[in-house]
Structure formats: structure tokens, C-alpha cells
Image (cartoon, rainbow, N blue to C red):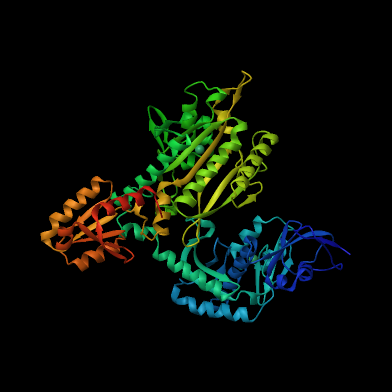
Amino acid sequence: MPKVTLPDGKILEVPPGATAADAIGKIGKKLLAASVAAEVDGRKVDLPYVLPGDCKLKAFTFDSKEGKEVFWHSSAHLLAQAVQRLYPEAKPTIGPALEEGFYHDFADLPPISSADFPKIEAEMAKIVSENLVPVRREISKDEARKLFSHSKYKLEMIDEIPDGELSVYQTGERVDLCSGPHVPSTGIIKAFKLTKASSSYWRADSTKDSLQRIYGVSYPEKKQLDAYLTLLEEAEKRDHRKLGTQHGLFMFHEWSPGSPFVLPKGTIIYNELLALLRSEYIKRGYREVVTPQLFNKALWEQSGHWEYYKENMFVLPVDDTEFSLKPMNCPSHMLIYNNSAHSYRDLPLRIADFCMLHRNELKGVLSGMTRVRKFSQDDSHIFCTPEQIGSEIDAMLDFVKFIYVDTFKFSFKAKLSTRPEKYMGEIAQWDAAEKALEDALKKNGIEYTINAGDGAFYGPKIDFDVKDALGRAWQLATIQVDYQMPQRFKCEYEGADGAKHTCVVLHRAIIGSFERFLGVLTENYTGKFPVWLSPVQVTLLAVSDQYNQAAESLATKMRASGIRAEANCKQETIGAKIRDAQLEHIPYMLVIGQKEKDSGKLAVRTRDGKVENEVPINLFISRVIDEIKSRSS
Ligand SMILES: [Zn+2]
Ligand SMILES: [Zn+2]
């Protein structure tokens, strides 16, 4: 009897000729019902795949990353089948899974808009109810060419696939070229929705044929679809581009694409973030530097960027040679390190830099504050000995927790990426660094997964996925170990043995790009920032003109104490003033009238509608100051 090894090490005996589905069914009926595909000896396969004898087997349900990919890719096929039934002239090209959902591209399809979605969705529902079983067949190149002679797109794809690796899937009346795997039947795609239609190009190349693209999402259960649609709606309401305009935080102009203008209110938040990091830098032994923006290409040649990264750099002619705006700080910090001699006693040296960076992103991918050409990071490079890696990572993880968990109340998960196939340095060095990273993660009680082989060629790294109030993950913080750049720049120290050694550099950013983080915070708080980040913390609302003077002088007093207070002396009713302050999410509103003027006590109204009467002015001021200083969320 063939032996099937499961992920937990258990061994299952199955009769010869058993399929992946048979083996999964032996583990449990429930698991089989939830499975969409499997992996046999590292290869992704359909559930009806016949096991090759002794093998390793893993089932993929929708809950796994792999399962989602199969489910969404199969949904793209479902969409193509419905479109072909409705528009027989349409030629499907490609239909991949996305991070959330799927799309399919079509040639020779009349322009589709959301008005056409109900008709297409109805046809998809019909195919789901037909519960069609996709059947895989391996075919020769010649047969494939005959089968797809009507589509120049498929013919082009067939030419690129080596002979012996071509397969097709027959689902009902439809045959498509595909490497698979697919869900066991169309019937399990129970809940779906088309979300968007746009135009695209064959091979994403604007000189090639124009295509129609239809996007969708799908789930095994309706409640999952509903939850996703609610999230989408909520995310749209919170879109930072919209909120940023509404609250006067930042703007863009076509004359500097991808380069945010941070407006006065946004700059207050930006500077508060800077102040937070700077105060931590003092406590945690970082040294801040200010570095040039423009560098001779010689620097980039030495760092390797000229060879590997030039297309992402803005290059300009200066002094009869080429210079570039810096896309990263690392090389310039190597120059600072080499400005003086170092002994092992001086290490670690933690250099921090908030300088502007420029990266030449394609105009088409620029988006709000999240994909930009100009940004600044809370960037730092730690020059240390190999023995210091562990304690430095430990300290960084504490810093990451302080920022995300203690300050912003976000949760996060870490991903540890280890040695890739192509790597620099010695295996023993890599093993030691990976162990130091993993030990530090364990010591700090941080939940993590391992991305085997996904490290950079110059060293292992940890990336952090931070979850916001909507449960969306943002990759913000990163820590990377680098053996290569210090070698390229000959960054050395004198060891205890009196000999020269090359140091290790740790690249790290915690909030990452300020611009991006400002966008994330704007969406997370829906513009309702905690008091310490609020551009205006207190607004004083004069009941009528005769109290303007009192409101102004109280605002001045508060500003002198370190509170961002503004008097609203506009010719509006008090009701209108309160509404404006509420729309702006100003944390505290103080109504100033005769009673307040006489008594010196305040009526405090919060943005959440709580009212507290007769609060002595000095008590109010000291309470707000405490709230600002503690940076409470
Ligand atoms: Zn497929
Ligand atoms: Zn760096």
C-alpha cells in the first residue's frame, strides 16, 4: 500500500491508484469538503490527481494563501465561460488571481460597463448551478495549436510553453489552456461579484492590442462576500486621498506627479511623528545626520545601484558627469562611517536619517500617498560586529513594538525571510544571522512566519505586516541584515584582536515612508486623529461677537502652554460653529459666553458629544497637556 506523508508527519496508507481527494477524504470528510486543491511532493495538483505511490501530501482549503489563489483563478475561468456564452466573439486571454479576487482580460469584447455585470453574473450563477467538473488533459504542442487556432493570443502563449508541459482544462463546453490546478467543480464558487471593468493591453504593453478587463471577487460562502463588500465600502469612505483633501492635510499637482505637498495641517502630523521618533532616538542611542540629495554616479557604482537600480533613479547632468537624486540613504551612510576610524568599542554605531528620497516610479502606478516618487523615511543603518546582531535586532523589535503596539494600538505579524538560492557570503554567517533574527522574534513574543529562500541576496530580513482598524495589512517596518554593502565600501573596525574586520550593517525603518504612514493613519482614524496628532486640539467658540476678545485671549493662553488652540470668531451661529468643529474632528470644543467669561470656568464638549460643565481653566489645560504628552490613542 502506498504511504502518504502528511504535513504533521503522520503517515496514511492508501490503495494503489488513489487520488489526492481519496487521501484527503481519509483524513476527514470536512477537510475534503473544504479543500480546493492539493500539493503532492511540492507540486500543486487538482483533487482528482492520481497519487504516484509513496508521496508527501498537503490539502489546500480556501483559508490558505494557495487555496485562495486556486479559488480565484478558477473564478476567473468561470467569468470567462460566462462571457463567452454571452459574447461568442470574445477571446479570453489571461485570468489570474489577485491579492483579493481575480480578473480576466478579453480581446474582441464590446466595451463592458458595470451595467452589464448583472447579466454576466446571472450567467456565472447558471454555470455554478450546473456544477461542472473541470477535466485536465495534457496535450502536445501541435494539438494545442489546432485547438486554439482561432486565438492569436493563445497561440503566442503556446509558443512560450515548452513541449510536454502543455495542459488544457475542459469545463462543460469550454476548453482553456491552463497549467492549473482548479477547484473540483464550479459548484463550490457559491458567492461572487464583479467589481470593476477597465481597459488593458495585451502583455501590459501599450503598443499592443487593447483589451477589456473585468475584475471580480468570490468566496465559498455568501457571508464572506458580504463581509468583504462591507470592508470595501468602509475603505472607500476612508480613502486617504478623499480625507486628505477634505481635512486639508495634503495635495498633489500634475506638475510634480507622485510628489505630495503636505499642507499646514498635514505638516503638524508629520512633525509630531518626527518628534516622536527623535525623542526615541535620544533614548535608544541613535545619532541623526543630514545628508546630501545629489550624488556623483561614482557612489552608485560602488554601491551597485548603478548596475541594478539605475532605472529607478532620477539621473541628471552635473559637472560634466552624471549625478543622481538619492533613492536610498545607505550608501551615503557608508561614507559617514568611513569618515573616521572605528574600534570594536565604538560599535554599534546607529546612524539615523530623515532625508528626502526620490525614486523614479512609472507615472501610471503613482497613487495617493502610498505610491510616490518623493518621500522620507525614518531610515537608519546600524554598523555592528557580527556578535552584536542579536542584541541589536532585539532592541529594534522593542522599538517596533513601542511604535505600533504601545503608541498606535496596531497589531502586527512578522515574516522572516531566509537565505535565497543566490546569496553572498558564507553559509555559516547566514545561519548565525537567521538564528539571531529568529531568537529575537521568539524572545519578544512576536508572531512570525518563515519565508524560506525569500531573503535578499545580501542577507536575511524581517518584514512586518501592520493591521489597521479595518483589519487591513500594511507592510511598513523592515529590518535587513547586510553583509555586502559594508564589504563594497570597506567599512571596517579594529577588533579586540587588533586586526581589521568588516562590519555588518542592519538597515531598518519602523514607520517606513512618512508620506505613506500619514496616508495609513488618515484612513485608520478616518481623519479623527488622537489628540496629540490633531492639527487643531481645542477650538474656542464665541457665542457672539462680544465674546471674541475673551475667546482669542484664552486661545493665546492655551497656545502658550503648548496646546494647538484656535478661536472661531466667524459670524456664524454657535450651532454652525459646533457642526464645523465636529466635521473637522477637533477633540475639544469650548463655548465661550457670558457665564464662562464671568466664572472663569469652561463648558467642555468633546467631538464624541460628551459635555462637562464648570471645568476650571487651569485644570482643563493641564489635562489636555497630559493627554498630548502621553500620546494616548
Ligand atoms: Zn486555469
Ligand atoms: Zn538602507
Q: Is residue 441 left or right of residue 546?
A: right
Quadrant for the C terminus in the image: bottom left
Labels in figure, total: 0
Q: x, y percentage for residue 618? A: 25, 51
Q: Which one is in front, 271 or 489?
A: 271
Q: Which one is in front, 409 or 595?
A: 595
Above or below residue 192? Residue 45 is above
Above or below residue 310? Residue 403 is below
Residue beneath the point at 80% across and 66% down: 50
Q: Which one is in front, 251 or 167?
A: 251
Residue furthest out toward the right: 1
Q: Quadrant of residue 95?
A: bottom right
Is residue 326 in sight in this rendering? no
Q: Is residue 451 left or right of residue 311?
A: right
Is residue 84 in sight in this rendering? yes
Q: x, y percentage for residue 16? A: 87, 67
Q: Is residue 521 left or right of residue 612?
A: right
Q: x, y percentage for residue 518? A: 39, 51
Q: Is residue 541 left or right of residue 260?
A: left
Q: x, y percentage for residue 535? A: 30, 52
Residue furthest out toward the top: 498
Residue furthest out toward the left: 546
